[in-house]
Each structure stands twice: as C-alpha cells, then as structure tokens.
Amino acid sequence: MTTPPGDTQEHWEQIWLPQRPYATDDLLTGIYRMSRPKALVKRYIEANPQAMSNLLVVDIDHPDAVLRALWDRAGWFPNAIVENPHNGHAHAVWALSAPVIRTEYAHRKPLAYATAVSEGLRRAVDGDQGYSGLMTKNPAHRAWETRWITDELYALDDLAARLEALGHLPDTSWTRTRRRNPTGLGRNCALFETARTWAYRELRHHFGDPHGLATAIHTEVTTRNAEYHTPLPPNEAHTIATSITRWITTRSRMWHDGPTTYEATFTTIQAARGRKGGQASGKVRRQGLEGL
C-alpha cells in the first residue's frame, strides 16, 4: 500500500537530518544547496548531512524493486521504499539508530563497517553498483509512490547479522580492497585509506615543513577524488586531507622521530620484504623441482 503524502512527510522528517541539503527536480540540470523547506518540495534530495550518515540507501534498478526490497526481510524491512511508478525502479532506505560520523575526528572503523553493511544491503537486492548514495528520491514528493514500511531504527550490528546469515555481508578483505570507483560510503573509506598510505611515504620529503606536507596531501586527495565516477563533495575531500595531515603531525612516530629514523625504518622494512619475497620464490622453485 502506498503511504499518503502527508504521513510520509511526517515520518521522513523524523529521520532525515540535513538542514541545507543538495536538491533538484532534474539531476541532469545540476544539484544545488537550499533550505530544508525548499528541498522538501524537490524530486531529489541529499540523503545525509555532510558530517554523518544515518540513512543507508540502495538503488534498485529492476522493475520488481519493491518485491526485492521486501522479500525475506522479516525483522529488517527497509523503513521506506520510494518507487518510480513508470518503471518500477526504487530506492530502499534503512535508518540507523546511531549515525556514522564522517568528519576528520571520526574513527574509520565504524565508517568502514557501515560501508560493508551498505554493500551487503545492495547485494541482498542486486542493487546498482554505480549508485553514489549522495542523492535519493524524495519520499514526500508526489512524483513517486512511497511505501512507509516501519519506524524501526537499526543498529549496524543487527543489519550485519542478518546479512551475514544470508551470505550477503562482504568479508573483511573487501573493506581493504582498493577499488578505483567505490560508491556510497565506500568512497570516503577508500579515499582515506589510499591517500593515508601515500602520505606515509610522502612525508619523507617534508620533514620540518608541516605546511608543505598539508599542501601535498590536499593536492593528492583532490586528485584521487576527481578520478571517481562520482567524486565526494569538495568539503568532504578537504576534511579527509585535514584528518590525515593532523594525525601524521600530531600522533605519528615517523614524523616526530625525524628523517634519520624514518630512513632507517624504511630500509629495514624494504629489506624484510625482500627476504620474504626471496623465501617465497625459493619455496616455489623447490616445489617445482620436487615435482620433476
């Protein structure tokens, strides 16, 4: 049953947090920031605030999207399903009981965990892999048929348990995979992890020059972000660059111990990797000889 527009807006405003979101009536003409009341009359709106995510949205590009979103979901139904009546495609929305923080002060493990859960939800319904997660169909707009399913707020652990039991939750190695075009919350995690790894090697050129290091990291983060099919907003990329810089200059032993210690440590690590590689190659050669 389609939920009446008035009831939908009341439910939606309780879980939708942005105060000045991106919004538009036509994605092809661009998205623009506007006040919350103005955004609520647009067809498409930003799903989450800039600093946190409390809604996990999956784009289901199939004519039976509603059935996919509801099938075998007892105990973890989406809060809302927002359907395009012309083709049956829909956005399914799950609301979290505790938002996941995305600022420079956030811990990365909860964000990576939320990313994995979001990917699990996508797999469970065969959702669109290319959906960025930034914009969603406005459930309160009359262009869509909205079904409000439940007011339940979900803990990540509860969703993860359901997804794992059905084999949809990606394993831990998935969260460390460096994909060129990650989507949704994965863009934030991937950009942070790849830029962080690069920055640890780059800092050797900036000892005693924190401003130079900050500039280099910001440039690298901006460049990597631009390579995504759907880049993060510039302010989020800036936040990630600031977070990496702050951690290195205030907490990293590599930075505080100075260039001499850094070079010695780097040389030791490279030598250990060389020995490990040599041992692996020797083992392969021995196995080959034994098979002759």
Image (cartoon, rainbow, N blue to C red):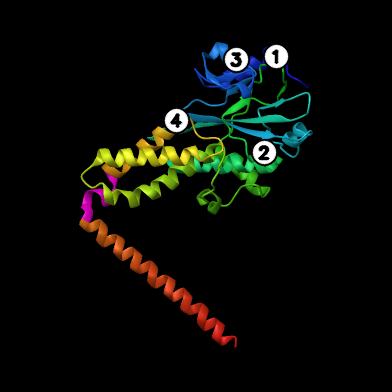
Residue picked out by circle 4: 234
Name the dominant secondary structure of the magenta segment.
helix
Cα distance in 3D space between marks 2 and 3: 25 Å
Would residue 222 appear left or right of 211 to someone viewing this image?
right
Q: Amino acid at mark 3?
A: Leu
Q: Element at badge 3? A: loop
| Magenta residue span | 251-259
Q: Element at badge 1? A: helix
Q: Which sits earlier in the primary sequence, circle 1 or circle 4?
A: 1
Residue that appears at 26% across and 59% down: 263
Cα distance in 3D space between marks 1 and 2: 26 Å
Residue picked out by circle 1: 5
Q: Quadrant of residue 138?
A: top right
Q: Quadrant of residue 119?
A: top right
Cα distance in 3D space between marks 1 and 4: 34 Å
Report x, y in % for residue 164: 63, 48
Q: Which sits earlier in the primary sequence, circle 1 or circle 2?
A: 1
Report x, y in % for residue 57: 62, 32
Residue picked out by circle 3: 40
Q: Which-is-in-front pick, marks 1 and 4?
A: 4
Q: How many marks?
A: 4
Report x, y in % for residue 226: 49, 37
Q: Which-is-in-front pick, marks 3 and 1?
A: 3
Q: Amino acid at mark 4?
A: Pro
Q: Which sits earlier in the primary sequence, circle 2 or circle 3?
A: 3
Residue that appears at 22% across and 54% down: 259
Cα distance in 3D space between marks 2 and 4: 24 Å
